[in-house]
Amino acid sequence: MKFTSTPKAPAAIGPYSQAVSVNGLLFTSGQVAFDPATGDVVGTTIEEQAAQVCKNLGALLEENGLGYEDVVKTTCFLADMGDFAAFNEVYGKYFTGKPARSCVAVKTLPRNVLCEIEIIAEMK
């Protein structure tokens, strides 16, 4: 088992790892729209926040020598299902390989952000 730690993605704010790889798979913790350098929330719209979330996931993928095309499953959490279409517009620009996905609405996300995504990727 290998643990990922990179300053290019937000630091864990609890007793967990940014990502863990085991048996040829990379599992990321849920990423939200935090700026890795400051810890501040980036953006106020679903589009801005979803883009930051995807960039944070990209940093974790890159740290492991992977790209978005290696992602096999995503789990997406939205604070408001009314943002579903706008979220999909941003999501689709990054996850062009169309991995399997679950997307659910949740009551509240950390620091009242609008979305969170976690991924599973195949290691090369």
Image (cartoon, rainbow, N blue to C red):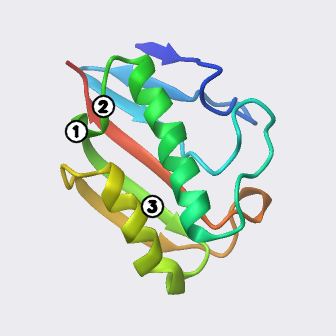
Residue 49 placement, left or right of 57:
right
**9 shown above or below 118:** above
Q: As shown in the figure, which amino acid type bears the numbered disc 1?
A: Glu
- Depth check, front residue: 63 or 86: 86
Residue 118 placement, left or right of 114:
left
Q: Which mark is residue 109?
A: none
Secondary structure state at the residue bearing disc 1: helix
Contact? badges 3 and 2 (CB < 8 Å): no
Q: How many marks?
A: 3
* Disc 3 versus disc 2: nearer the observer: 2
Residue 72 position, x and y percent, is 23, 44
Quadrant of the rendered image containing residue 78 = bottom right
* Disc 1 versus disc 3: nearer the observer: 1
Residue occupying image coordinates x 45% and y 61%: 76
Q: Mark 1 = which residue?
A: 69
Residue occupying image coordinates x 31% and y 60%: 92
Mark pair 1, 3: CA separation = 17 Å
Q: Mark 3 = which residue?
A: 76
Secondary structure state at the residue bearing disc 3: strand
- Report the quarter where the N terminus lies: top left
Contact? badges 2 and 1 (CB < 8 Å): yes
Residue occupying image coordinates x 38% and y 18%: 64
Q: Mark 2 = which residue?
A: 67
Q: As shown in the figure, which amino acid type bears the numbered disc 2?
A: Gly
